[in-house]
Image (cartoon, rainbow, N blue to C red):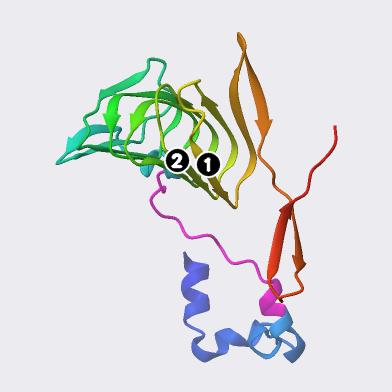
Amino acid sequence: MNAVFSELNKGSAITSGLKKVDKSQMTHKNPELRASAIVPSKKGKPVPPKKPSELTNKKPPVRELQDTKWMISNFENVQDMITIEGEMHQSVFISGCSSCVIQIKGKVTTISINDCKKIGVVVDSTISGVDVIRSKSFEIQVVEVVPNISIDQSDSGSIYLSSKSLATEIYTSCTTSLNVNIPDGDDMKELPAPEQFKLTISDKGKLVSSVVEHAG
């Protein structure tokens, strides 16, 4: 302690023993030295890990009748068949479902399937039709009569028609890998929907489109 007080009693002369720093060693005059300087880490409270987005944004499954519309949404990996009893004045809206099978009994007005993946839909009958939008790996089985099926922006779908539903009209747009299955004796015959078209200009200046047939 006597040595410490002795140094303090020197006053301004205490700095006489310090080594002079050259300008090349001053960080405020040399940006490259500041860039290489090690900044000590700040200590703080540990940050809890974030939950995966698929868990925080997961919505509960819904199956309910709202006025005259059946809402079926957010069902995932359901082993048992999801069944509803529909009526002629009711419509069905299916959205956000994956890896499940939905059966719609009775005759309903219309059925809409939106943003679904790996689902099967069994339909008895509809007054209007069935719409499929932005869905992948879907299957639709028609038991009785469905006037038309419209498929838009979808991929890898299969439609199974019974002998009573062969008059069903199918409309596609921006859709790939679609197959239509029809009865063939005791088995089913698979008919791939065309994806490639040829466009030509007629003598009257109109655009004419025709399906490109692929052999084999």
On the rendered image, what quadrant is the C terminus found in?
Answer: top right
Measured from the top left, where is residue 28 in percent x and y? 63, 87
Name the residue carrying label 1.
170
65 or 184: which is nearer to us? 184
Pick whichever of labels 1 and 2 is earlier in the sequence: 2
**Vertically, is 2 above or below 84?**
below
- Tell me which residue sits at (45%, 40%) in the image: 148
Query: What is the distance, in whole Å, between disc 1 and disc 2 at their CAs?
Result: 6 Å
Who's the residue at 68% across and 76% down the image? Answer: 35
**SS label for mark 1:** strand
Residue 70 or residue 129, whichever sits in front: 129
Q: What's drawn in magenta, residue-wise? A: 33-48
Name the kind of residue labelled 2 in the image. Asn
Which is more toward the observer, 123 or 3? 123
Residue 40 part of the magenta segment: yes
Residue marked by disc 2 = 148
Asked if residue 174 lies in the magenta stretch, the reply is no
Q: Is residue 112 visible?
A: no
The 10 Å Cα crowd at callout 2, few under 14, some 14 to 19, many 20 or more, is some
Tag 2's secondary structure? Answer: strand
Residue 97 in the image: state x and y as whole percent.
41, 34
Residue drawn at x 85%, y 36% as measured from the top left: 215
Disc 1 marks which amino acid? Ile
Give whichever of 6, 75 is nearer the camera: 75
Q: In this view, does 120 lie to the left or right of 179?
A: left
Residue lying at the far left in this picture: please name it: 67
Labels 1 and 2 touching (C-beta < 8 A) = yes
